[in-house]
Amino acid sequence: MADSLLKNKHLLWRAGFGIGINQVDDLKNKNIKTLINELFKEESFTEITYDTPDIDATADYMNSTAPAEKKKEMQRIYRAQNEELNLNFLDKMVNSKEQMQEKMAFFWHGHFASRVLNPKFNRQLLNTIRKNALGNFKDLLFAVSQSPAMLNFLNNQQNKKDHPNENFAREVMELFTMGRGNYTEKDVREGARAFTGWSYDKEGSFKERKNQHDEGTKTFLGKTENFNGADALNSILEQKATATFITTKIYKFFVNENVDHNIVNILSTSFYNSGYDIKKLMMDIFSSTWFYDQKNIGNRIKSPIELMAGMMRMLPMNIQNPENLIVYQKLLGQMLLYPPNVAGWPNGRSWIDSSTLMLRLQVPQIWSGLRPLEYSPRQDDDIDMGIKSKETALNKSFKNPNITIDWNRVDQIFAHKNCEDYLIQNPKSLDMNTVNNFSDKSTKMTIINLMSTPEYQLM
């Protein structure tokens, strides 16, 4: 297999969601620099939205005295809108030419984890993250920290002078910027005072409520001033620990879970000195020779979203009931807009247990119509967030994913090519005799069988 194909394939999986069917033909001969430039090319930004109509803003659906039917109706509409956002985000990952932008947005979606019921807030945060995904980390941090979704999720409307709530200040430092060990409990307390009064109005616009802000002097990260929230974020960004923490997390996600600290130190110093230029950091990573070292290729387990998006990019599909895809997300353990907690999704081996591995290996056959879906989504109040669904109805409607794959097109594109060279990151690790034994030698069965191997789970 040509060295350029190996590198290009590696780049497309890490800086995007794998090879698209329309990229197969010229991937072997494409220059890596050309491919990097294509990945980083940003077209005009389009927001992700939903078409489900908003509920009547004048109706008080959330009032404790509102009738139960009204609350149920609101929950149904919220669920429909959030499902639409979820599927439209997945669609961007599969079909957008701006693969790096969407992959980076997917990373930030897990980094700035938030879970709220309000789809308007979810839409706003999702588009904020997508818009700033390859921009400046300072702009991204400020925009996320002032979003109603995050202020709501981390309880900052309850953060008022005389009664500070430390949740927001703690998570901003621990999970979003510096990481544990780089601040003290006093910094959390004083930081919380700085963020008092940060809130939002009914329309979802950020508001600084001056009458709720603690105007007193605060000592935060070694400085004593009359800090407000913006001052606190600027102080956090002045800490080199912030650049190191973010760079390390990016390295683990895009390169290797085993961190090369020498490389990370060089990258994070450059990231800090650039004033937190995310695009430059990612360009430094993907343009380096070490990124293409054998030890960094095929060493990461695909997350469920990466697995699904990768298959959808490679197989031209017509999906009659796209809402089925949400059940697959749920069954495989990664539902967009619903991270398990404020720390986001764990990675690596945590994706694989006995039930998820079996389903992962069977998805290609289920989607190709060769076997039924024999798994049922668990009633999971943690994901349903209190909105109960009728499991029996769910199971009936989700047995058949109603996916049609254009196998003729796949046949034409893979004529005279080794399918495994395009589908498996390290084809040498694969026993093709075993794959062929289960195949009728057709391209269709070869691809389905390759996608059903443990090796296809790696990227």
Image (tube, rainbow, N blue to C red):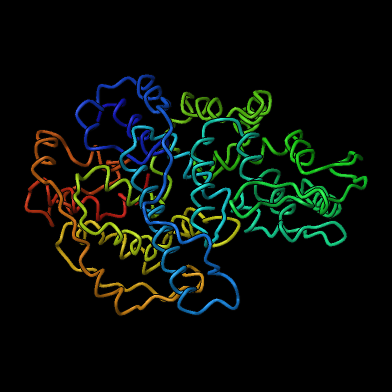
Instruction: Determine which quarter of the picture holds residue 396.
Output: bottom left
Is 42 or 349 nearer to us in this picture? 42
Q: Compared with residue 79, is residue 72 higher up or lower down, i.e. above or below?
A: below
Left or right side of 274 for 347: left
Q: Residue at x 68, y 24 (%)?
A: 273
Query: Picture coordinates of residue 157 (x, y %)?
Result: 71, 58
Q: Residue at x 88, y 40 (%)?
A: 222
Instruction: Determine which quarter of the picture holds residue 275.
Output: top right
Is 305 or 158 nearer to us in this picture? 158
Is 402 or 201 nearer to us in this picture? 201
Task: Report the residue that reaches farthest toward the front.
Answer: 58
Q: Quadrant of the N terminus?
A: top left
Left or right side of 210 for 113: left
Q: Quadrant of the C terminus?
A: top left
Left or right side of 401 for 412: left
Q: In the rendered picture of this protein, how many numbered marks are placed on residues?
A: 0
Q: Residue at x 63, y 28 (%)?
A: 271
Query: Picture coordinates of residue 247 (x, y %)?
Result: 60, 37
Q: Compared with residue 133, is residue 75 higher up or lower down, i.e. above or below?
A: below
Query: Picture coordinates of residue 288 (x, y %)?
Result: 49, 24
Q: Residue at x 31, y 65 (%)?
A: 358
Instruction: Determine which quarter of the picture holds residue 231.
Output: top right
Query: Picture coordinates of residue 348 (x, y %)?
Result: 47, 53
Left or right side of 61 for 31: left
